[in-house]
Image: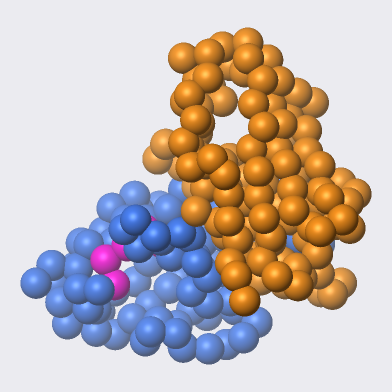
Chain colours: A orange, B blue
Amino acid sequence: ETGVTQSPTHLIKTRGQQVTLRCSSQSGHNTVSWYQQALGQGPQFIFQYYREEENGRGNFPPRFSGLQFPNYSSELNVNALELDDSALYLCASSFSTGTQETQYFGPGTRLLVL
Amino acid sequence: AQRVTQPEKLLSVFKGAPVELKCNYSYSGSPELFWYVQYSRQRLQLLLRHISRESIKGFTADLNKGETSFHLKKPFAQEEDSAMYYCALSGSARQLTFGSGTQLTVLP
């Protein structure tokens, strides 16, 4: 059984650019959630995907978008990057059964916007 | 709205001493509470969840609905317990709301 993986590990972009972050879910999991963790803060929920559909969204603007693929891997896209988007982006996968489930986190992608 | 508050950013205790990491929450329904831990250079991982009522690595946490708290406790701290601890809440939407974390340092 493989855990959650994310790519790339680090990324540097400039303001106004677009970025795509990738996540491979743990084997057997059908739900993926994305979180943004700014320095010194706890992770903040961006959105969740269940069976390729968005299943909840936090307080993030529409320039944050996502996809989940049939193999349950996922992408987070951020358009028109701003300096405040610099953060660690975490992906978490889980197996949704309709009740509360445990989310397993990846190592994160550290994004720096200059 | 759901909110989690961890009042201590930093906490230091000596090895063998008891430790308590505080967590208070705000949620109108019946939440599920979690403690996540992040050891140095490792990913965030689940330590325990209140619904399981387990003791993991000697840690326990009791949900107090009256005080809306979910404090994490261990009677005898070990140096390997040094890490960042996050309290998290999951409501009906199944999204996790995290506190800002407490960095625990266990001194020799």
What is the chief secondary structure element of the magenta stretch? strand
Instruction: Give left or right: position of B95 versus B79.
Output: right
Q: Residue at x 66, y 20 (%)?
A: A18
Q: Residue at x 38, y 77 (%)?
A: B73
Q: Is residue A17 magenta?
A: no
> Considering depth in this image, is A84 or B42 the residue closer to the camera?
B42
Q: Most extreme residue toward the left, as rendered?
A: B108
**Above or below: residue A78 compared with residue B22:** above
Percent across and percent down for residue A101 are 72, 72
Q: Most extreme residue toward the top, as rendered?
A: A16
Q: Quadrant of residue B66?
A: bottom right
**Above or below: residue B35 compared with residue A57:** below
> Considering depth in this image, is B36 or B14 the residue closer to the camera?
B36
**Range of residues picked out in magenta:** B81-85
Q: Residue at x 76, y 72 (%)?
A: A28
Q: How many marks?
A: 0
Instruction: Give left or right: position of B11 versus A2.
Output: left
Percent across and percent down for residue A96 are 81, 69
Percent across and percent down for residue B101 are 43, 53
Quarter of the image where the N terminus of chain A is located: bottom right
Q: Residue at x 14, y 72 (%)?
A: B14
Q: Is residue A81 visible?
A: yes
Q: Is residue B67 visible?
A: no
Q: Quadrant of residue B82?
A: bottom left
Instruction: Give left or right: position of B98 versus A45.
Output: left
> Considering depth in this image, is A67 or A94 the residue closer to the camera?
A67
> Considering depth in this image, is A76 or B81 the residue closer to the camera?
A76
